[in-house]
Image (cartoon, rainbow, N blue to C red):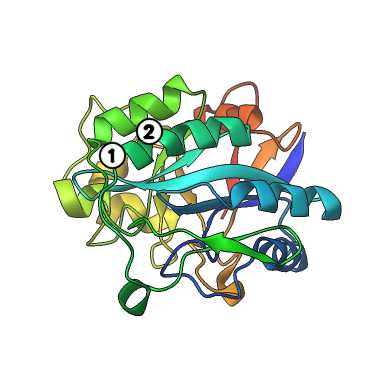
Amino acid sequence: MRAFKADLHIHSCLSPCADLDMSPRAIVETSLERGLEIIAVCDHNSAENVGAAIRAGAQKGLHVLPGIEINSSEEVHTLALFDSEKQALAMQELIYRHLQGTNRPELFGDQVVANEFDEVEGFNDRLLIGATQLALNHVVKEVHRLGGLSIASHVDRPSFSILGQLGFIPPEIDLDGLELSRHLSPDGATSKLPEVSGFTLVTFSDAHFLDDIGRPATSFLLEAPSLTEIRMALREESGRKVVGH
């Protein structure tokens, strides 16, 4: 086993709040420049750019996991990470059935669907920035049913986080881990946020701009760059574990 440096929370140009330079190809190239070995593209409520990112990564030797950052009905953000694009698109289908509203680019930004060659293939007109009608517990259960991992996003932020929105972490919600923002070190997290005690903590960039990719990242001790191995690391099984931030 060895350490793999990972950033599993990166937004592409499909997210309305992300810079238009965040094309799948540019994300992959910048990730490699930053020494990343595993990334996940997690756009708001959509997986339409993950296939292009996977293909761009395969061309360059970077392992790309398909993901989505899902906004629950409580306005809690969670990362859904999957092995395959098929799983992510199945989750997307459920999200789209429970997502209302139309995007207003002049207010929220363009939502660009791009391919691995930096070519624009279209625009998503759904209100991806909005909350779904799916309760958080339902979101986590569906992600798990599809074989994915569910990690609560930026739990130390005052908004769009499980602690910011709910004030606590409901024990019935079976989260695989908690993500801290770049503003809080895992070393000091439990003293500032006692609620995170007992959970595996990770830090990713939540990058909306190319310059933010990999800042910060988490290193996992794994046998291979796969979701199965990351799941084991989050559970500290068979020697797999988080080894650095």
Query: Looking at the picture, how far across and down is residue 122, in whole percent?
Result: 56, 62
At label 2, the amino acid type is Leu
Please identify the residue farthest to the bottom as the structure is shown: 106
Query: Looking at the picture, how far across and down is residue 64, in whole percent?
Result: 68, 47
Residue closer to the observer: 229 or 145:
145
Q: Which residue is mark 2?
A: 94
- Label disc, if present, on residue 88 of the rendered structure: none
Residue 16 visible from this viewpoint: yes
**Residue depicted at x 44% and y 65%:** 182
Residue closer to the observer: 11 or 243:
11
Residue 240 visible from this viewpoint: no
Left/right placement of residue 226 relative to residue 176 reads right
Above or below — where is 133 with respect to 213? above
**Residue depicted at x 32% and y 58%:** 127
Query: Looking at the picture, how far across and down is residue 85, in whole percent?
Result: 61, 36
**Residue depicted at x 25% and y 49%:** 100
Query: Looking at the picture, how far across and down is residue 162, in whole percent?
Result: 25, 47
Alpha carbon distance from label 1 to label 2:
7 Å
Left/right placement of residue 27 relative to residue 196 reads right
**Residue depicted at x 37% and y 57%:** 188
Q: Quadrant of the N terminus?
A: top right
At label 1, the amino acid type is His
Q: Secondary structure at mark 1?
A: loop
- Label disc, if present, on residue 98 of the rendered structure: 1
Residue closer to the observer: 182 or 68:
68
Left/right placement of residue 98 relative to residue 31 reads left
Q: Secondary structure at mark 2?
A: helix
Above or below — where is 75 with respect to 158? above
Q: How packed is label 2: few (under 14 Cα within 10 Å), some, or many (20 or more)?
A: some
Q: CB of mark 1 within 8 Å of CB of mark 2?
A: yes
